[in-house]
Amino acid sequence: MSVAVETRNIVKTFDKGRVVAVDNVSICVRKKEIFTLLGPSGSGKSTLLRIIDGLERPDSGDVFIEGECVTDVPTHKRNVCMVFQRLALFPHKNVFENVAFGLKMRKTDKTEIKKRVEETLAMVELDPKIYAARYPQQLSGGEMQRVALARAMVLRPAVILFDEPLASLDKRLRDKMRVELKQLLKKFNITAIYVTHDQEEAFTLSDRIAIMNKGKIIQVGRPMEVYERPRSAFVANFLGDTNILKGVVEKVGTKSISIKLKEGISILAAKEEMFSSTRDVIVCLRAEKIVLSNEPLYENRFEALIKEVLFSGENIEYLAELQEGLILRVKEKNRGQTFNKGDKVFVNWRLQDSVLISE
Amino acid sequence: MGKMKFEGSKLLNVACFFICLFLLFPVIIILISSFDPAKYIRFPPSGFSMLWYQYFLSNANWQKAFANSLYIATLTTLISVPCGVLAALAYRKYNFKFKNLLNTIVVLPYVTPSLLIGITILMTFSRTFLRGTYYLVAAAHSLWSTSFIYLLMQAALSNYDLTFEEAAMDLGASPLRTFIEVTLPSLKSAIISSVIFGFITSFGEVTMAIFLTTSETITLPVALWKSLKFELHPVALVASMICIIFAVGTMAIIVKFVGIETLSKIGAKTEMSK
């Protein structure tokens, strides 16, 4: 599999070095891959994207596009395109002129421009006959989105960069556009780097996700991998609803490890070679992996008292207090409420759902 | 956006009417009197004729003053519009050393009494070949109108989204192409207003011009001022009307292009810098 974009040890600071936006970041994006940079705001993901695009210069480090070092190449000479957060469709140009802009700058032949613009508009399912002469102000949010994509696609760049392009849409449209975007990117085998702070968006779109925090890449992997196997408390906490518990490895058995939590109780986790006795560990327990019941079910089972019931439509969230004063968040699908505040229940989870992170 | 219906009391309406009348009254008086065929200025007029308009148009001195004003105003526009527009763009787009200091320096001529600018420029250049030339007047006017255009452009640029320029460069436009393809069209109406403002501030300016012009380079407002001071000749009323028509026409065009909101923003900005 060949590499489309690579960054090596990128560092970028602002305010004369006082703010480190990107801290020694190296990523490698393969061809035809949708690669997402996911992180909280201020984590440096947009800055990294702008460095790849050439809108910002890194303090040190290099950017490679299709194997060629482009660190000193200005934006307008790089074979990359960006879809901006606010899309930045030129308001004084119509749809055709917007999409044709890049080709015009590359001095493409007029008939070729017309052919390719119409072709690309058709690709994003905008009928050129209807839309070519319209101005951005006359388009709906979804249509503008597609024009912005077409404007980048028409140039057939090595990679298209997306800077939270769906952030300004309302939720319903955003969910719809997300699916559409993924289908388009996959259908035409486009390499994409996508920046977002929305984890659901990252999970559904991406082939691989890089989690960023404070300018650093914390973990890279397939969506399922980073979700199920977080390698740090930050990732575990950032993705989904997680109970983070601290403890010490107490006993290593043949199949399982027993961990004594600082609250006093002992829980079981699947055996992993790297965790030996007396070692400090963090246990990540996803709220949706815990099952409430009247009878004990799995390897980990504890009596608990329901302290709070929070209804959020699709899900019901419980705060369950274990006897030792430990409160766990439990998320269940809404299948009609089964427990009430004050109920005595069992909280249960399987061995493999106690995800261990070395401290 | 729907306009709110303003429902003031009757008293307020009457007050507004009189205030407007008070503001417009002098202009109306001048307009009426300029058609008076009498040999001296007075009110009410004794009749109606185009006598002094004909006099104005056939008199070589007035013609020259009018032509000089047009010439100097054109020069001023050519100097101050590029300077003011580019300075405002630089302020909006880049961070550089002494940015705040430079900002103050550019605005300074606008808040300095034009009398002072006139005298100091005269003192500085009195022994040079520039003395009494069109260029020196145009330079002095440019100083003033550059800072005004700078403020006007800053107000217009506060709503200007730099992402458009980034998008253009991202799509392969060189910085120069970006300026031509994206920056200029986006700022079209503000630049048109700058041109008109640059022109009219120079065309109507009298204080600096009194110091810097000679009988050869005399401008219309200076000629008007001299005529009023030394002769009180009725043709001065015609010259006043020409100046007023220029100013009112200009304002009408500007309001059409940039709207009254941007103008009030400039007002707020100059208040701050004062």
Image: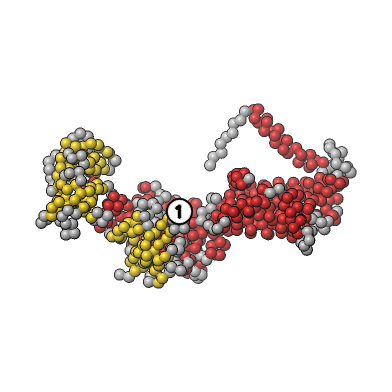
A263 versus B78 height, above or below: above
Q: Where on the picture, by quarter, is residue B27?
A: top right
Identity of the residue furthest to the left in this view: A254
Q: Looking at the picture, how far across and down is residue A105, in whole percent? A: 51, 67
Residue at (33% x, 59% y) in the render:
A217
Residue A212 can be seen in this image? yes
The quadrant of the picture occupied by the N terminus of chain A is bottom left
- The crowding category of the residue bearing disc 1, from other C-alpha atoms within 10 Å (few below 14, some 14 to 19, many at least 20), is some
- Which amino acid type corresponds to the residue marked 1 in the rendered image? Arg
Residue B259 can be seen in this image? no
Q: Looking at the picture, how far across and down is residue A118, in whole percent? A: 45, 63
Q: Looking at the picture, how far across and down is residue A312, in whole percent? A: 29, 40
Left or right placement of residue B152 versus residue B41 in this view: left
Left or right placement of residue A106 versus residue A34 in this view: right
Give the residue pinned by disc 1.
A86
Residue at (20% x, 49% y) in the render:
A247
Identity of the residue furthest to the right in this view: B39
Residue at (76% x, 56% y) in the render:
B123
The answer for which chain carries disc 1 is A
Left or right placement of residue A336 versus residue B93 in this view: left
* Front in this rendered view, residue B30 or A273: A273
